[in-house]
């Protein structure tokens, strides 16, 4: 079965819109705002401190690339919020550690960053 394990959920390959050597990104199935993207390490790790330096760097680089693409899609009137979650308590009991990329403003439906 192609795709990727994300905690107890299986993300199908067609739901993953970009991959890097050690990470992948997909649209959140329960978004806080329209366009809410999750970036996850390919190797599940409960916390960011459990990632290797190469995995952590790759995750950050992919999150930055996704954020840049979202920012460009918003034009001049929007922004992007990046939020990192690691550990079950930080992620409402959902490992693995991951990055959230949330578009803000620019007609995307994004509101205050405090909503994240």
Image: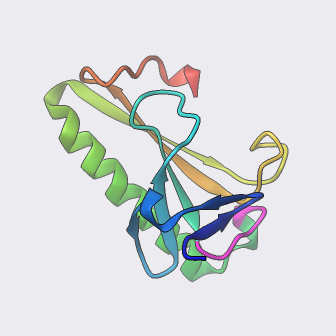
Colouring used for the render: rainbow
Indicate the quadrant containing the C terminus: top left, top right, bottom left or bottom right.
top right
Q: Which stretch did the figure color magenta?
A: 42-48
Query: Looking at this rendering, what residue extends furthest in the left direction?
Result: 76
Q: Where is residue 86 in the image (x, y as percent from the top left)?
A: 73, 54
Q: Is 88 colored magenta in this rendering? A: no
Res 4 quadrant in image: bottom right
Query: Is 52 placed above or below 83 here?
Result: below
Residue drawn at point x = 75 percent, y = 44 percent: 91
Name the side, left or right, on which 110 lies relative to 6.
left
Query: Is 78 placed above or below 101 here?
Result: above
The total of numbered circles placed on residues is: 0
Residue drawn at point x = 54 percent, y = 28 percent: 32
Q: Where is residue 98 in the image (x, y as percent from the top left)?
A: 62, 56
Query: Looking at this rendering, what residue extends furthest in the front direction?
Result: 1
Name the side, left or right, on which 92 lies relative to 68.
right
Magenta region, main secondary structure: loop
Query: Is 98 placed above or below 72 here?
Result: below
Res 107 quadrant in image: top left
């Amino acid at each position: 079965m192609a795709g990727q394990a994300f905690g107890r959920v299986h993300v199908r390959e067609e739901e993953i819109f970009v991959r890097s050597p050690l990470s992948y990104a997909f649209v959140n199935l329960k978004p806080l705002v329209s366009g809410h993207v999750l970036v996850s390490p390919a190797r599940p790790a409960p916390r960011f401190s459990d990632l290797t330096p190469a995995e952590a760097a790759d995750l950050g680089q992919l999150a930055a690339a996704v954020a840049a693409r979202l920012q460009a899609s918003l034009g001049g009137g929007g922004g992007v919020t990046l939020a990192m979650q690691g550990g079950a308590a930080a992620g409402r009991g959902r490992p693995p550690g991951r990055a959230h990329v949330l578009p803000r403003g620019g007609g995307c439906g994004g509101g205050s960053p405090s909503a994240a």
